[in-house]
Amino acid sequence: MYLEKFFSFMGSLVCHQIQARTLIIGDIPLTVCARDTGIYMGVIFGIFFLIVKRKLYADWPPKLGQAIILILMMIPMIIDGATSYLGLRHSDNLTRLITGGFFGFPLAVFFTVARNYNPYKNNRIAPFNTLREILIAGLFFIIFLLLIYYGAIPWIVVNLLLIAGMLTMFYLIADSIVSLLGTKSKSKRRIVSLIGLFCIFVVLYLLKRYVFGGM
């Protein structure tokens, strides 16, 4: 009960939580909508992929062809969101989930490179060795999303992954900004980034309570 309330509260900071647009597992809605579920799962899957490939400290952008593929992966969600919001077509939750996922995966890669890039050293570690790695990761990711969509993964596991993806994404954003500011000490940078993460959620809470809460 308390865990469900916690998940719901965390999701309310970043999502409209419209039930018709939210996946339901075991008769309980997930903490965020289908599109946001895809995005945060994409982020956490991207980080997991980089860990498995020992590329978590990648500090150099992907090759041009790889970067183009990653950017193309992000476009369907933009098209899906824009056309559905403009009333040009109806989008379903499976489409929202998958397009959101393929938006989040590249985000994890690009933010990882941004946070690790150091203008004062020779950056050499690219996140991928070959284009094939991206295609294989994409295939496994689709299977993973389908397992979520059809309720094959327990509700609590999916929500824990969603919270992890949410925290990871905003931490990557904060850490990338701190990195651009030129903070060299790793311990100091980690502390500043965590403070930045906390500040982001404070702002989200204030917006929810005093701006969007009254609408």
Image: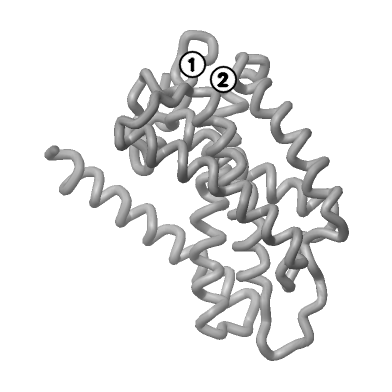
Looking at the image, the residue that sits furthest to the left is: 214
Q: Amino acid at mark 2?
A: Trp
Compare residues 34 and 92 and report the one nearer the observer. 92
Q: Give the residue at x 52% y 49%.
A: 167
Q: Is residue 69 left or right of residue 198?
A: right
Within 10 Å of disc 2 (Cα), the crowding (few <14, some 14-19, many 20+) is some
Q: Quadrant of the C terminus?
A: top left
The kind of secondary structure element at disc 1 is: strand
Residue 60 in the image: above or below residue 18: below
Q: Give the residue at x 41% y 38%.
A: 81
The kind of secondary structure element at disc 2 is: helix
Q: Quadrant location of residue 112? A: bottom right
Q: Give the residue at x 62% y 47%.
A: 73
Q: Give the residue at x 57% y 44%.
A: 165
Compare residues 201 and 94 and report the one nearer the observer. 94
Residue, disc 1: 24
* x and y, in percent, of residue 113 in the image: 67, 67
Compare residues 134 and 2 and report the one nearer the observer. 134
* x and y, in percent, of residue 121 in the image: 75, 88
* x and y, in percent, of residue 119 in the image: 66, 87
Q: Amino acid at mark 1?
A: Ile
